[in-house]
Every structure is written in C-alpha cells, then in structure tokens.
Image (tube, rainbow, N blue to C red):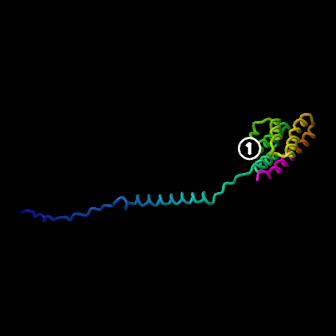
Amino acid sequence: MTQQQPPLELIDIYGVWYHPWWQQAWFKYGIISSGIILFLLAAYWIYKRFFYVLKVKLPSEVAFEKLHSFVKEDYGSPKNFYITLTDILKEYFQELYEKPFVGMTDDEMMHFLEKMSAVSQRITEKVKEILDGVTLVKFANQRAAQEQMSKALSLAIKIIEETTLEEH
C-alpha cells in the first residue's frame, strides 16, 4: 500500500510592504524636533530684538557702587585709602571724559583736569583738596587722619554728584 500523498497546494504570495522614508517614524520625529527647535530659535530672536533691553550703567552709577563697596570694606592704612579713592576717581574721569586718566599720576591727573575746558573750576578745586589730603595724612595723627579721610570721601561723592549732570 502506498501512502497517499496530499495534493500539492499552491500557497498564495504575500504582498511586499514598502514604507517610503518620509513615512517612517524616525523621519516624523525628526521633523517635529526640528520644528520645535526652529520655533524656540525664532522666539529667542524676537525676544532679543524687541523685548531685551541691555542695562548700560552710567559712569556715575559705577563710581557710586565702587565708593559704596569701598566704604563697607576696611581700607586699612590711610595710604591704601587714598590709593583706592584716587583710583576710583581716575576710572570715573576716564569714563566720563574719555581720556586716559588711569595710567596717570595724581599730579598729572590734576594738571590734565586743570587744562580741560569741560571740567569746572569747582571740580578741580575739590580734586586738588583730595590730593592735598594725601600729604596732610602723612604727618597727621590717627584721629586727624580719620577726619581727613572722611572729608576726602565726602568730597569724592560731591564730585561725582556734580559731574553727573554732565553725563546726560
């Protein structure tokens, strides 16, 4: 007896599924991510262009901040006090009058201020009084030195207040 074999059957061919690259998930996620990044960049550009205002400080504001922090700290000896005070004034005058005061000695600064027509006589007298305080402090006792330093500090504040009007 022969075993009967099942008849041969033809099996249907399955269809080939092809997904183009623009329909694949990685492409869709990439487009969404790129859109979000472009939106954020555009929002940042609009913010910077129309809403962001850079706060520029006037030279007097910077000088007052430096004097305020200078008063809070312990400046030590009268010599250090006058060095720091004249440095603050030189930086202020450099920003205000756009001349190289920072590299000058005190005498050069005084001479330069006296020659400038933009600087009033009252300002030069007050600067001269501060600079004269340096020599007075060298030979004064501690109490007189403290009084002279506080007077020099108040003169520096008055100088900045008076020249603030020239900034505008």
Q: Quadrant of the N terminus?
A: bottom left
Q: Position of residue 41 (x, y in %)?
A: 54, 57
Determine whether the residue tagged by mark 1 lies in a helix, strand or loop.
loop
| Side of 141 relative to 50 (left or right) | right
x then y, percent, for residue 20: 34, 60
- Extreme left residue here? 1
Residue type marked 1: Glu
Label total for image: 1
The overriding secondary structure of the stretch rendered in magenta is helix
Q: Residue 130 sits in which quadrant?
A: top right
Image coordinates for residue 72, horizontal then vertical, percent: 81, 47
Using the rendered view, name the quadrant where residue 25 is placed.
bottom left
Look at the image and say whether residue 166 sits in the magenta stretch: yes
In the drawing, does residue 11 fall left or right of residue 42? left
Residue that label 1 marks: 98
Q: Is residue 164 in the magenta section?
A: yes
Q: Picture coordinates of residue 135 (x, y %)? A: 89, 35
Residue 29 appears left or right of 140: left
> With respect to residue 157, does 83 lie above or below?
above
Q: Residue furthest front?
A: 117
Span of residues in magenta: 154-168
Taking the spot 37% from the left edge, 60% from the top edge, the residue there is 22
Question: Callout 1 environment at 10 Å: few (<14), some (14 to 19), or many (20+)?
Answer: few
Residue drawn at the location 29% of the way across and 62% of the way down: 17
- Image quadrant in which you'd find residue 132: top right
